[in-house]
Amino acid sequence: MATVQDLPQVRGVKNIPMEELYSSGHRTCQGCESALVMRLMIKAAGPRTIVLGSTGCMYVANTTYYSTPWVVPWMHTQLGSSGSAATGTAAGLASMMRKGKMQQEPINVIAFCGDGGGMDMGLSAISGALQHDEYNLLILCYDNESYANTDIQASGGTPWGANTTFSPPGKETRIMNTRWKKNMAPMLAVGHPNVRYVATACGSYGLDFNNKIRRALTIGGPTFIHSIDPCPKGWDYDPKYSHELGMLSIETGIWVQYEIIDGELTLNGPSRAIAKGIRKRKPVEDYLMRQGRFAHFTPEDIKYFQNRVDESWEKWWLPGVIPISSAQGE
Amino acid sequence: MATVQTKLFQESTEELISGSEAVGIACALADVDVITAYPIRPYDTVMQYVARLKADGAFDCDFIVAESEHSQFEIVKHASAVGARTFSGSSGVGWFYAFEALTVTAGLRMPVVAMVGNRALDDPGAFGVEHNDALAVRDLGWMLYWVATAQEALDTALLAWRVAEDPRILLPFALSCDGSFLTHSQAIVQVPSQDQVKRFLPDYHRGTLQLHPDNPITIAPQVNEDWLMEIRRQTDDAMRRTSDVIIEAYEEFKEEFGRGDPSPFIEEYMCEDAEIILVGMGTLAMPTRVAVRRMREAGKKVGFLRVKFFRPFATEELQKALGGAKAVAVIDRDYSYGSPSYGGVLFHELRSTLYPLDERPLMLNFIAGLGGREVMVRDVNEIVETTQKAIDTGKIDQVTSWVAVRE
C-alpha cells in the first residue's frame, strides 16, 4: 500500500486543479488572504483529505452552522491543538488500517492554526506532533500577525511596533509591542531534525503554494508550512492590496520564502534572487507605510526596523533564516 | 513475544495485579487502538503497564507519549472522531491541565475512556488520594465511576467502552481509582479471555458521525445562540439514556463473566434495617465495611452504601436506599470551599437527592482522608458516634465535621 497519495508537482498555474473543495459558505472579510490560503491548500491536497482547524478566524469566519465551505471532512480543534489534532487523526487512521478495522488508503491529514494558536499556545503540541515520524501529517500555520478573530490582539507573530488592540500607540508609549516576531519555521526545522519538510509560503504565489503543500503531503512523516497572510482588517489597508502586500513582505526581505527538504535549505522566488544578489531588497518603509498598523512609526522606528532586517540578511549564518553568526567570524 | 501475556488472553486466568495493571489488561482485552500517555503519579502506572504490554507484543495499539496532558486528551479525542477505540488518563493537576480537552470531548460526544488515578490537587504537593480532581468534570457530560477493587477496575473498564461507545450514548467515561490504595495495591483478579470480552464488547462504529473522506461532514462549527441550547439538550438526552444502557450492559456482563453486584450504580453493605447509613466512594469502603461489621456484631444498626456511579447519579435508587434511615453520614474524600454548609461534593448531591422525600433522614457530612490520609476504623467509629448523638438529641450541632484533623 502506498502510504502517501500521488500528488505530482504542478508546472504552470493553469495546471492547478480546477476542483474547488473550499467553496462558498464562508464569511471571511473582503481581501482575506487566509481564505485564499485555505482554498489553495485543499485544491493541492484533493478530496481524500481530512482537515482539522484550530480556533481562530479560519474557524469562526468559515464554519457557521449550516453553511460550511468545506467539501472535505473538517473538524474543529482547540486553539492550541493543531499538533495534537493532526497526531490523533493520523494515529486513529493508522491504527485502524493496520488492524484491519478500516480499509487501507493514504488519507491526507492537515491541521491548520493561526499565528496565535500555532506560534503561541500551540507551539508545544506542534513540537510534539513533529516528533512522531510514523504519522504522515501537515501542520499549516496561516499567519496574519495577530489574534485576528478576537479583535486584533498582539501575538508572538505580530511585528515589532505594530498597532494592535493590545499594543495601541498612546500618549506616553508609542511602541507597545516590543517583541520581535518569532522565527517559527526555522525554530521547528532546527528543533526537529527528523522532520523531512519545513517551508514558508505566501498566497501571492499560488503555484509555489500548491507545490509546497503537495511536497509536504507526499514526502512522508510530519511536516510544517508557515504562510504569511496579509489581513486588511488587522493590518489596516484597502483590501485590494492584499496580494501586493504579500509580495512586498518578501521583496523587502522581511518575509523569506524557502523550503527545507531533508535538512537542505532552498530559497525560492524573490528571496532567492535577493540572496544571490540578483535583486536588491526594497526598503522596509515601502511595506510598512502602506499599512495603518505602522502609521505611528517615526523615522527612527522605520530605521530600527530596517536595521533589524538588514542584520538578518548580512549577519545571520543562514541569511534571513537562522539568526546565529559565528563568534570567530567564520 | 510475551508468551505469558498471550496465554493470559487466550483463556481466563487468575492474576495477582494492581488496580492500574487491571485497567492496562482491560485495554489489551478491549483491543484499544490509540492510547496516550504522560507521566504523573499515581495514574501513570497504568501507562507503564500498557507500554510493557505493547513492547512485549501482547497487543497492538498506537501508544503515543504526548508532550502534555492537554495533548494527551486532544489526541484521543481526534482519534475517536475517525472511529478508533481510545484510552487515556491522568491524575490531580494533570487532569486539570487537560481540562479544556476534557470539556470538548464530552461536547463533541467522543466516547473516550479515561482512568483518573485520584490525587490531591496542588499546591502544596501531595501524591495521595482526593476526589476533587475527577469530580471537577461532573457538570460536563462525562460518566464518572469510582471503583473500590482491582477486579472492579478491570470489569468497569470493559463496561466503560461498552456503554460509552453505544450509539445511543457516545459520551466519555472516567474511571476513578483512588491513588495508591487502588492504583498501587495488588489483589487477586479474575482476568477473562479475549473471546469472552469480544462477546461482551462489540466494535466501535460511529456510523454517520465518523470523520472520513467517504463521509465528508463538518464537526463542531460555530453555532452560537441559534443552536447551542438544542445541542446541550441532545447531550442531556444522551446522559439521561445512560442509566438504561448501563443496566442492560451490566446484566449482560454478569451473565458473561459470572460476577457483579445487584446494582451497577450503588453497593449496599448491611444497609437493611440500618438506622445509620454511612455513604462514601472508592477505597474507603474497606475500613468502613470493617467498622460496620464490628458494630453490627455489637448490635448496632449501621450500614454502608458505596456510590459507584457519580454520573449518572442514581437519584431514585439512592432515595429508596437511604430514605428509610434515621440518619445519613456522608464521608467525602473531597471538599468544596465556600459551598452550602461548607461541605463536600458528594454530601451536596445526596442532600439534594433526599430533599424531595416526605420524611428526610438527618444528614451529616464528614471530610476525611484528604491528601491520601488513611481513613481508620476508629475514624468511622467516631463518625457513627457523632451521628448517633444527632439522632438521640434530634438536632445537628454541626453539619460538616473534619475527621482526624489536627486543630
Image: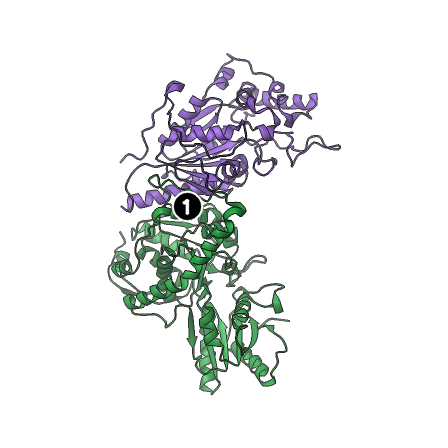
- Circle 1 is placed at which residue position? B78
- Along the line of sight, which residue is nearer the eye, B402 or A14? A14
Q: Is residue B380 above or below residue A176?
A: below
**Does dot 1 land on a helix, a strand or a loop?**
helix
- Along the line of sight, which residue is nearer the eye, B365 or A72? A72
As drawn, which residue projects farthest toward the right?
A171
Q: Say which amino acid is labelled 1.
A: His
As drawn, which residue projects farthest toward the top?
A278
Residue occupying the point 44% across, 59% down: B239
- Along the line of sight, which residue is nearer the eye, B315 or B272? B315
In the rendered image, residue A65, in percent from the top left (x then y), is placed at: 47, 42
Q: Quadrant of residue A39?
A: top left
What subunit carries mark 1?
Answer: B
In the rendered image, residue A29, in percent from the top left (x then y), is placed at: 54, 31
Q: Decide: few, some or many residues near mark 1? Use Cα within 10 Å; few <14, some 14-19, many ≥20.
A: many
Q: Is residue B245 above or below residue A160?
A: below
Query: In purple, which chain?
Result: A
Query: In green, which chain?
Result: B
Residue occupying the point 53% across, 67% down: B349
As drawn, which residue projects farthest toward the bottom?
B299
In the rendered image, residue A172, in percent from the top left (x then y), is placed at: 75, 33
In the rendered image, residue B184, in percent from the top left (x then y), is placed at: 42, 63
Relative to A308, A36 lies left or right: left
Residue B309 visible to the viewer: yes
Q: Quadrant of residue B290?
A: bottom left
Q: Where does the N terminus of chain A fall, quadrant-wise?
A: top left
